[in-house]
Amino acid sequence: MEKTKQRNISISGSGTAAGGDYDQVKVNGSAHINSDVQCQVFKCNGSAHIEGSIKTGTAKVNGSSHIEGNMEAEEMTINGSTDIDGNLTCSEVKIQGSSNVKGDLKGKEIIVRGSASIKGNVSGDEVDVKGQVKIGGDCEAESFNARGNFKINGLLNAGNIDIELLRLCEAKEIGGENIIVKRSIDSSGFKKLIKFFMGQQTDQLTAEVIEGDHVSLEYTHAKVVRGNTIEIGPGCVIERIEYKQSLELDENAKIGAQEKI
Amino acid sequence: MENLISKKDLLEAANISYGQLYRWKRKNLIPENWFIRKSTFTGQETFFPKEDILQRIEKIKNLKDDLSLDELADMFSPSPTITSLSADELTKRNIVSNTALEMYNNHNGTTSTFSFDQLLTLYLLDTLLQTGEMNRSEGMELLQILQHHSNEINGKESELIFIRKMGVSFFILTPEPAKLFVESQTKIIAHYKLNQCIEELKLKIS
């Protein structure tokens, strides 16, 4: 069957549109869309309020948008702010402004350069955070890179976990193959600026349990750390360590008990 | 209470590392509800249902060289893979016996291709017939109950129980794992976890 050419919506100024099937949806002023939208390209330069779900190929939000349903896209860039009341499913998502997702976030490549808050679970192949991220549930990825601040209320489960701490980072449990936690070494203006605004807070990671094959920690407070090879650097306070092969301890680390299994 | 094994003992017993366990969890090879958290004197510890997890890990270790982790996840997931097989293929590849197929066709009319749900029904029928514990008329009743409730048991941890007392037999189908106590003369002839049957069936088909 031949596909009929689909229409576009373009709202410049302020307007209301019904949902439906479109090719392109562009908002340059303020828009209100009444129901679900399906399109190839969704672009919002002003503010948009969608009373439903969006399914699109690419999405770009430069202003602010509020989606009451789910968001599904191949590729999504958020430069302004976006609130999604449902789930966000996207193979490539880049959050450069701020965003709130009340459901789960699922994607292949998840890049956060600003701040993101997800109430549900996060799962992806690659999660890269330079900024701030809050996750209400679990976070699962093949690789998890963070240069900044994060708070994960559930389990952080990733093959490679590479963390450079900034201020108080938190995860309930951490598990994976290679886990590296370092205090960020760069003393560039950026960090000083943040410290100036946010107050002096020490860089530190808090977790209840950390389990991995190779674990290397700095400035980490944990109840239990378990692994094959463990390196404990300066600033760590750990109640109990269980290791299989090797354990290296920094002299400035406080360790409760250690046991070779 | 089921027999539980702590994470530490499990790694020892199965000879795997933390990394492997977490990777398999990430790939959904190990169901979330098998991770049972309990507080112990060393803080939070995770426990697993011992038999289930050891069996599962053994399977993963045996199959992981031949199948990718994603394929394995498909196999372990209780939701059916979308496959259909023709009747010819079923008998040719020896997935079910001719007798079972014949009974199924008698009950439902002849079909040439089977969906996964139908395959599962056939497979259960065949397995029970093969044990010699179930006769043909009971087989018909089994077909009836499975077809009647196929929607309710899909994608859940359903179990099939076959009981007999003084020659009277009946089937019980539960959408959730069940513990059963029966009278002294009653015999539990079969107690199948459908998830395991699905796994076995998927293995046979693939």
Image: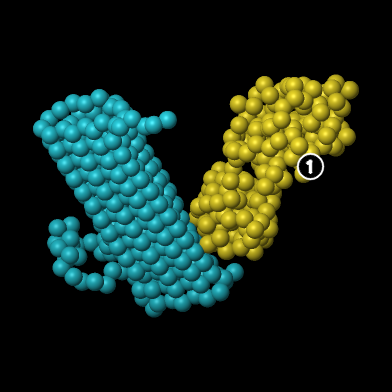
> What residue is shown with label 1?
B92
Q: Nearer the viewer, residue A37 or B194?
A: A37
Instruction: Give the quadrant of residue B191.
Output: top right
Tally the numbered discs: 1
Q: Nearer the viewer, residue A133 or A166?
A: A133
| Residue A158 visible to an observer of this rendering | yes
**Residue A7 vertical position relative to residue A173 in the rendered view, above or below:** above
Q: Position of residue A231 (x, y in %)?
A: 44, 73
Q: Tell me if mark 1 has few (under 14), some (14-19) or many (20+) residues whose alpha carbon lies within 10 angstroms of its own.
A: few
Chain ID for label 1?
B
Quadrant where the N terminus of chain A sits is: top left
Q: Residue at x 57, y 64 (%)?
A: B17
In the structure shown, which secondary structural element does the residue marked by tag 1 occupy?
helix
> Judging from the image, what is the letter of the chain drawn in yellow?
B
Q: Residue at x 36, y 61 (%)?
A: A145
**Residue A108 vertical position relative to residue A5 in the rendered view, above or below:** below
**Is A44 positioned to the left or the right of A251 in the image?**
left
Q: Residue at x 62, y 36 (%)?
A: B157
| Residue B188 visible to an observer of this rendering | no
**Residue B195 vertical position relative to residue A96 in the rendered view, above or below:** above
> Judging from the image, what is the letter of the chain drawn in cyan?
A
Q: Residue at x 10, y 32 (%)?
A: A13
**Is A164 positioned to the left or the right of B166 in the image?**
left
Q: Nearer the viewer, residue A245 or A140?
A: A140
Instruction: Give the quadrant of residue A47.
Output: top left
Residue positioned most to the left: A13
Label 1 amino acid? Lys
Q: Position of residue A259 (x, y in %)?
A: 55, 70
Quadrant where the C terminus of chain A sits is: bottom right
